[in-house]
Image (cartoon, helix red, strand yellow):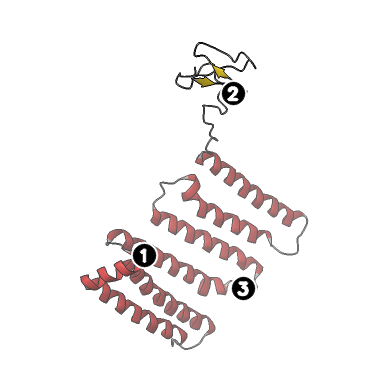
Amino acid sequence: MSYCVNCGVELEASLKECPLCNTPVINPNKNVSQATTAKPYPTSKGQVEVVKRKDLGILLTVVLSATSITCFLLNLLVFQGSLWSFLVIGICICLFFFAFPAVIYTKTPIYLSLLADGVAVAIYLYLITYLTPTARWFWELGLPIVITIVILMELYTLLARKLPFTILSGALYLFLEIPTFCVTLELLIKRFLGSSYRITWSAVVLTVCAIIDIALITILTEKRLRNEVRRRLHF
């Protein structure tokens, strides 16, 4: 026996609607036709079109080129006191080379990409020399520092690719290169200032990194110790 869902009157099984309030009688055991039932949400899923790398690269190139050209013309025709536009042009060059392997051409070899980044930074530093009384700082300090950083980055990438790479081995390579860079930097500064070639503050960095390197080498060579460190540090 069934009852009206609206007024509660008792209904016979053959009735299609309530005789008292005319409320339609729906049998829950029968499937409701999906064709006559309107769905509250659309069935098709919309998706925003993904921006192509080529289009993004064109946009990036146009924006950086327009920024460089407009700043150069503004410097040439209006604000002629100094070559300040070279700073903007240098930054645009660096941004282009930094974004090139990620946006424009993703198949660029990592070694070539690092070299191009170093060249871009060197060009930027060279453009700064037009705003300084002399370019000696660039040839004796700026350029050698950039070359040192590029060589160390290339070497780190080579070690990471040719040798088994883990978090511990990566940390070992890093703490081998940090003191190398610091000692080279101090010697370059001493040379630029005309001081004696004697390391001072870089010796502290060298000592600390040497201790860390010895500890990392010990962990990497001892299998049980290495596994214990990995288990406790969750890597």
Amino acid type indicated by mark 1? Tyr
Q: Residue at x 47, y 49 (%)?
A: 102
Q: Amino acid at mark 3?
A: Thr
Mark 1 or mark 2, which is nearer the start of the sequence? 2
Q: The residue tagged with tag 2: helix, strand or loop?
A: loop
Q: Which mark's residue is nearer the viewer, 3 or 1?
A: 1
Q: Place residue 134 in its image quadrant.
A: bottom right
Along the line of sight, which residue is nearer the eye, 204 or 230? Answer: 230
Q: Label 1 belongs to which residue?
A: 156
Q: Is residue 90 left or right of residue 110?
A: right
Query: Which residue lies under the disc numbered 2?
Result: 8
- Residue 229 coordinates in the image, percent (x, y): 30, 71
In the image, taking residue 79 as reference, residue 27 lies left or right, namely left
For mark 3, give the secondary structure: loop
Q: Earlier in the sequence, mark 3 or mark 1?
A: 3
For mark 1, give the secondary structure.
Answer: helix
Name the front one of labels 3 and 2: 2
Q: Which residue is mark 3?
A: 134
Identify which residue is drawn at 66% across, 51% down. 67
| Furthest-top residue in this view | 14
Give the residue drawn at x 57%, y 62%. 124
The image's mark for residue 116 is: none
* Amino acid type, label 2: Gly
Horizontal and vertical percent position of residue 202: 44, 83
Q: Nearer the viewer, mark 2 or mark 1?
A: 2
Q: CA distance from mark 3 to mark 1?
A: 34 Å
Front residue (pair 44, 86):
44
Q: Quadrant of residue 165?
A: bottom left
Please name whichever residue, 5 or 160, is drawn nearer the observer in this view of the structure: 5
- Residue 227: x and y in percent read 25, 68
Give the residue drawn at x 49%, y 83%: 190
Q: CA distance from mark 2 to mark 1?
A: 81 Å
